Image: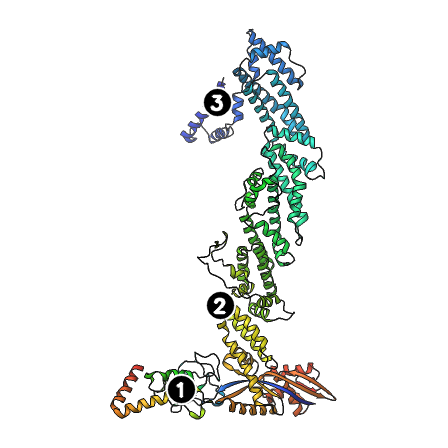
């Protein structure tokens, strides 16, 4: 049967090939010749098409072609063939086969073997016809419904043929299988676009309309598609549609909506709206279909909600506490233990039991329907948790952790991050991961310590970090307990926790802020400085409030850290005693006596301004007096005046009015100069007589000018403004 | 214009008055000097105290120019090996009595210790001057 010329041709090529390679294109073969030979070889790849063109598959016409013999069998076959030909011509079963044809069928297809052979030949015949004539028409048809209708007619026709032929079970199966393969090839053709067409059909009529339309047509379509073995594609398309619908629904209902409970709403939407339509389709195509699929859909919806929230996570955190509801729903969706979804039906126990570190069995089923482009890993909770963390860190870097942001804002965001992520994941593992970035950044901020310390200690409403202060007052530090080996309820850290995860370190807001720095010392120093300033400003030596705050701090930082501050407070308390024992002179003169070693921060601060200020003589005399008395009480000790520190209350009589002032000693000394001397004075005079820097002098003069006591005559001369 | 000072709240620091040998710069040298025993400033405290001043006074040396926190020198003199000598210059340590702050138990303890050492010394003296001298020599070697 193999045409010899083909074989010859092949051997020719082989011969060329051999020669060519052996003589390597020398001799009588020119380079061009050789090239064309090779090119010809390259253009003839051996494929199925070539093989079939060479060896055509046998078909029914081969049966009829053996002319010349005229026995009964041959006659029967020709009857049979002409009968089939008539059917194929008209594309429909015109009439019942005649008695002659029936007997021909009976005699030709006596046993199963004959039937099988016949079916094979028949198949080959119609395949070539189908592929050549019918398929292009079916594929190019725009309407899916029309294609389906035509195919359905063909299916009916063929089932009638198979019935007339009286095929037995196995040949019949082969017959059907072949037809289905042909039909499938129509739908899987690239030009057919089954995916798009079916999606559109289902969307238009089922999923996106208020009430299902044309359900009968769709049902027929689906049944047909299912019957020719496209179940998998069908399911995949349906699931994808459902997921798209869920996404759209979530996008419309949940985006930016953070203060209403949504999970219940979503669940009921799926139950009442999506699932009935979903089931219309899947119940036809999936034999395993049951009610539990609704839980898979709900699960998918929750997962999609999480994806949506992940995109919004930064806003969720920065808008805390108004987003508490959204956060706690997010928690329900990402926590490892699956949520107990409303259990009114009895057959969903399986769902409730399944923990979601892996996916529940049916969940993977439903996802298997969908195409590869739907990344299954994105549905695992571990993946989502990781994504949540990554996304938040990225957003933080973009929006918060740069030099444009205020330190206080960053701290506020840090606090809401702690609170929000504790809602999302009460174990604190996610929190631990996200705060690392912020902590690292905060460490680089120079004013962070000052802001935290002021935030902790300032109880006024102006404090933007008042939360820290409240936290300090209300929440005593919970001691971080080490793993207790005898604790019977001990559980290991969550599976995705980082190696150095410590819950207490990140969940307690103050502890979390303090532990940004390895050493507590910088905080203690800042506290000392802040309290030092306050202690000096205190009126009437009342230190009770400072002691109270210090006690709170001690509870956090440890008793031993605050020795210096203890001494400082004691100094002020003692100053009160000293003052009362000194008695008052003509002018109320009060002193705070400091143990200078413990007030380093203050004295450094002070000497930076000016150490050599000459106070008014009356004041200096008063001080000498006090010092003498002090040395009597406290044997062996002397006092040194820090002239620029302290507060002075003044009354200025300008004209008829008396103006009260509370100023620094520097400012008091400057204005006192104007009393004793001519009322016009230059900056240089002030500098000389008070022995202060020019900067301090002009600053003091400007203060009085601002208060309308002095007037500037020229660049450096001031006069009393009377 | 009249300026009336209603109230002047001044801030001062207290310092021990020291008469140490190197107080050349006079009063302004507010002893950043350290106690020879604990190496902490006199205006601070000895290692065992928390509050400076009344609770942790200092003792000025009379025979020698060395000063110490009271608690530091007490602990030194409590040891028999100190022999009642100044730990800095090895002269017999005597406190300046007139400079002693209000006499407390601790100061009388100091006095008792010094007296005890003197009695010991005088006892040794009467038995053998030689012994005492060698004893002192040994002691000096040990300290080196």
Q: Which chain is disc 3 placed on? A: A
Q: Secondary structure at mark 2?
A: loop
Q: Is residue A85 above or below residue B54?
A: above
Between A710 and A583, the one lying in front of the other is A583
Residue B124, horizontal then vertical, whole percent: 28, 90
Residue A25, horizontal then vertical, whole percent: 43, 30
Q: Where does label 3 land, which residue?
A: A9
Sort mark 3 into few (<14), some (14-19) or many (20+) by Cα contacts within 10 Å.
few
The alpha-carbon separation of the residues under discs 3 and 2 comes to 89 Å
Q: Where does label 2 land, which residue?
A: A519
Contact, mark 3 vs mark 2 (Cβ under 8 Å): no
Q: Are marks 1 and 3 on the same chain?
A: no
Q: Which chain is disc 2 placed on? A: A
Residue A619, horizontal then vertical, whole percent: 60, 90
Identified at 69% across, 87% down, the residue is A652
Q: Where does label 1 land, which residue?
A: B109
- Residue B22 occupies which quadrant of the picture? bottom left
Q: Nearer the viewer, mark 1 or mark 2?
A: 1
Between A299 and B107, the one lying in front of the other is B107
Q: Is residue A215 above or below residue A439?
A: above
Disc 3 or 2, which lies upstream in sequence? 3
């Amino acid at each position: 049967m193999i045409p010899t010329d083909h074989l010859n041709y092949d051997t020719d090529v082989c011969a060329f090939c051999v020669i060519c390679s052996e003589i390597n294109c020398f001799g009588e073969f020119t380079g061009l010749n050789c090239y064309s030979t090779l090119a010809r070889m390259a253009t003839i790849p051996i494929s199925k098409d070539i093989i079939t063109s060479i060896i055509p598959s046998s078909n029914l016409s081969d049966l009829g072609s053996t002319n010349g013999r005229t026995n009964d069998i041959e006659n029967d076959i020709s009857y049979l063939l002409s009968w089939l030909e008539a059917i194929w011509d008209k594309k429909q079963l015109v009439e019942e086969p005649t008695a002659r044809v029936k007997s021909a069928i009976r005699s030709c297809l006596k046993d199963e073997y004959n039937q099988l052979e016949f079916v094979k030949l028949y198949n080959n015949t119609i395949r070539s016809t189908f592929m050549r004539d019918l398929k292009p028409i079916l594929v190019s048809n725009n309407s899916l419904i029309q294609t389906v209708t035509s195919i359905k007619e063909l299916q009916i026709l063929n089932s009638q043929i198979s019935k007339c032929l009286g095929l037995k079970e196995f040949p019949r199966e082969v017959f059907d299988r072949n037809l289905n393969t042909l039909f499938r090839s129509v739908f899987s053709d690239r030009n057919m676009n089954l995916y798009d067409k079916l999606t559109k059909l289902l969307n238009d009529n089922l999923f996106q309309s208020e009430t299902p339309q044309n359900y009968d047509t769709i049902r027929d379509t689906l049944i047909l598609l299912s019957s020719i073995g496209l179940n998998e594609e069908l399911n995949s398309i349906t699931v994808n549609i459902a997921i798209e619908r869920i996404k759209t629904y979530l996008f419309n209902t949940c985006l930016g909506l953070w203060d209403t409970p949504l999970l219940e709403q979503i669940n009921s939407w799926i139950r009442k709206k999506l699932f009935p339509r979903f089931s219309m389709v899947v119940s036809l195509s999936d034999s395993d279909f049951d009610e539990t699929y609704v839980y898979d859909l709900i699960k998918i919806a929750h997962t999609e909600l999480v994806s949506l929230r992940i995109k919004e996570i930064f806003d969720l955190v920065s808008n805390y506490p108004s987003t508490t509801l959204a956060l706690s729903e997010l928690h329900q969706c990402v926590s490892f233990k699956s949520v107990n979804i409303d259990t009114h039906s009895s057959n969903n126990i399986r769902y409730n039991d399944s923990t979601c570190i892996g996916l529940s069995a049916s969940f993977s089923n439903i996802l298997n329907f969908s195409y590869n482009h739907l990344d299954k890993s994105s549905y695992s909770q571990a993946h989502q948790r990781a994504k949540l963390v990554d996304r938040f860190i990225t957003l933080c870097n973009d929006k918060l952790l740069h030099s444009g942001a205020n330190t206080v804002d960053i701290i506020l965001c840090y606090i809401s991050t702690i609170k929000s992520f504790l809602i999302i994941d009460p174990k604190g593992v996610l929190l631990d991961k996200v705060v690392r970035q912020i902590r690292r950044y905060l460490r680089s901020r120079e004013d962070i310590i000052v802001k935290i310390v002021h935030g902790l200690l300032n109880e006024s409403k102006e404090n933007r970090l008042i939360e820290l202060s409240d936290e300090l007052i209300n929440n005593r530090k919970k001691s971080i307990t080490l793993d207790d080996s005898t604790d019977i309820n001990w559980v290991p850290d969550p599976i995705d926790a980082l190696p150095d995860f410590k819950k207490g370190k990140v969940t307690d807001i103050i502890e979390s802020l303090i532990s940004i720095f390895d050493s507590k010392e910088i905080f203690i120093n800042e506290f000392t400085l802040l309290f030092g300033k306050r202690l000096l400003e205190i009126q009437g030596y009342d230190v009770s409030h400072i002691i109270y705050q210090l006690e709170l701090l001690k509870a956090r930082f440890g008793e031993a850290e605050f020795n210096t501050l203890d001494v400082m407070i004691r100094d002020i308390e003692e100053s009160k005693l000293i003052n009362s024992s000194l008695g008052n002179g003509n002018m109320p003169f009060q002193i705070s006596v400091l143990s200078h070693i413990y007030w380093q921060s203050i004295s450094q601060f002070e000497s930076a301004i000016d150490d050599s200020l000459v106070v008014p003589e009356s004041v200096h005399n008063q001080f000498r007096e006090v010092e003498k008395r002090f040395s009597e009480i406290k044997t062996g000790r002397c006092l040194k005046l820090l002239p620029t520190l302290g507060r002075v209350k003044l009354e200025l009589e300008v004209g008829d009015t008396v103006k009260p002032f509370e100023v620094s000693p520097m400012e008091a000394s400057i204005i006192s100069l104007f009393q004793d001397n001519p009322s016009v004075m230059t900056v240089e005079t002030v500098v000389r007589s008070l022995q202060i820097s020019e900067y301090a002098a002009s600053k003091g003069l400007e203060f009085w000018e601002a208060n309308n006591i002095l007037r500037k005559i020229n660049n450096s001369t001031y006069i009393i403004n009377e | 214009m009249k300026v009336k000072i209603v109230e002047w709240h001044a801030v001062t620091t207290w310092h021990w008055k020291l008469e140490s040998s190197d107080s050349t710069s006079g009063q302004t040298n507010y002893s950043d000097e350290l106690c020879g025993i604990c190496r902490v400033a006199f205006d601070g405290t000895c290692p065992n105290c928390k509050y400076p001043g009344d609770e942790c006074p200092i003792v000025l040396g009379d025979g020698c120019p060395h000063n110490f926190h009271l608690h530091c020198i007490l602990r030194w003199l409590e040891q028999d090996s100190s022999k009642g000598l100044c730990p800095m210059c090895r002269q017999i340590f005597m406190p300046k009595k007139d400079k002693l702050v209000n006499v407390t138990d601790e100061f009388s303890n100091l006095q008792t210790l010094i007296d005890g050492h003197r009695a010991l010394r005088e006892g040794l003296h009467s038995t053998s001057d030689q012994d005492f001298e060698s004893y002192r020599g040994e002691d000096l070697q040990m300290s080196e």
